[in-house]
Image (cartoon, helix red, strand yellow):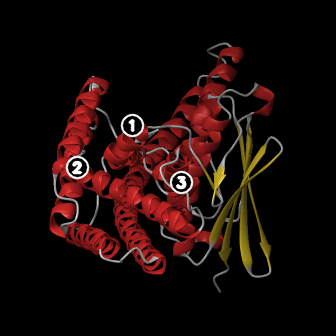
Amino acid sequence: METLWNLYVMFSFVITLLISESVIGLRLPKRKHFWCFGILGIAFAFLVSYLVQFFPQRDLFVLVMKYFLIFLASYAFIFGVYKVNPMSYIIVGSLGYCVQHISYQIYSILTHSVIRETRSWYMILLLFGILAIVNAAMYFIAIRRMRKNRDIEVNNHVQIYLSLLSVVITVGISLGGILFSHEDDREIIIICLFSILSCVLAIALQLALIKFKEDEHEMDILKHMVHAAKTQMYLSKENIDIINIKCHDLRHQIHSLRGQINEGEIKAIDKAIDLYDNDFKTKNDALDIVLTEKSLLCKNENIRLTCLVDGSKLNFMCPSDIYSFFGNAIDNAREAMSNLPIEYRSLSLSSEVQDDIFVIRIENYTDRQVVFVNGMPQTTKTPTYHGFGTKSMKIIAEKYNGAVSFETKGKLFLVKLLLPLQR
């Protein structure tokens, strides 16, 4: 037991630190052959952890340097495993250290207040049990929400550095306080609580900066999508106008040939023209354009598209917003019905007025299990722009003081747009 305890004292810090850093970096892109480089990094961190044991133990500066050197040595593991930008390396190391420090401070509180055993294998299990709980909390609160195989990006590097500095100061104060506390349990517990609070605040700051950068990135993509929708709307209008003119001229030419060619052939040609000669009259030009454009795709995919919407009540909206909102809604519905039997490929748009609220319902069948997070359907796709369509729909609705909701009722998927009536 003595030998096991000595090994625990010597390597517990580096082991718990490496575990925490591994959890923080779970969703980051990894190097080729990262297992080999990771093992080499672990070996180097263990070597440094062994060598610093020969440092004086009762000198505060030396004690801080001892843990700092082990922390720096752990970067051999981080560099070896992950292939990310420099800021990602810094954040993985700092968050990992914070998680490790919180775990150890909770362990210290328990050993100075509840559990009085010393040099027992129960103590080893206790530390790693606490570490598992804290890391699991960190994963479910933050890490699993990060995008897989993407670097960590932050908006303000200065605040990250200040956060790191606060962690260094906190660790120094906690080590010094415990070292010179004369083994007073109350003093140690207060110092540990202070360390935990400081590390939690440092983690919260870093995660907030990461989330802010992700939101900023998403907004840039959504702005790009709205701009692209505006451009596409004008191109679609020009194309539809040209098609309608050609269809109109072609009908006249075919009818002038009646009696000269077989009547069955004329009907077949008329049917083919009908495929392109769609004429939606909703009293809103932008809505007519998107319905006409998407109806061609729907017919090609054997999807029945019906629309009973009073588009005049959308005239206060920017045309590109109308085009973007309904284009995304119809495209999502088309994708959801791609594997359904033909008899279930039905998409309907309808509207009604309820207490000065204009309500538009978009309904389609789906055979997919839809997962909702905060009321928003989650995509199972990985390409860059998947998942942003519904977010842009939400932004457009809120832009006009409205709201959009998504829900499933059995095999029916329902999108509901609510807008205040404009008088």
Front one among 404 and 254:
404
Badge 1 marks a residue whose secondary structure is helix
Disc 2 to disc 3, how far (Cα)?
21 Å
**Amino acid on which disc 1 is placed:** Thr
Q: Can residue 286 be seen?
A: no
Of marks 2 and 3, which one's residue comes earlier in the chain? 2
Position of residue 7 in the picture relative to residue 386 (left or right): left
Residue placed under numbered mark 3 in the picture: 130
Q: State which quarter of the image contains the C terminus.
A: bottom right
Residue lying furthest top: 262
Please give the label number shown on residue 70: 2
Front one among 300 and 342:
342
Of marks 2 and 1, which one's residue comes earlier in the chain? 1
x then y, percent, for residue 243: 48, 39
Q: In this view, does 201 lie above or below 145?
A: below
Residue placed under numbered mark 1 in the picture: 3
Question: Where is residue 252, by image quadrant?
Answer: top right
Position of residue 327 in the picture relative to residue 49 (left or right): right
Position of residue 79 in the picture relative to residue 222 (left or right): left
Badge 2 marks a residue whose secondary structure is helix
x then y, percent, for residue 403: 63, 70
Task: Please name the residue shown 63% across and 29% down the image.
Answer: 301
Closer to us: mark 2 or mark 1? 1
Circle 1 packing at 10 Å, graded few (<14), some (14-19), many (20+), is: few
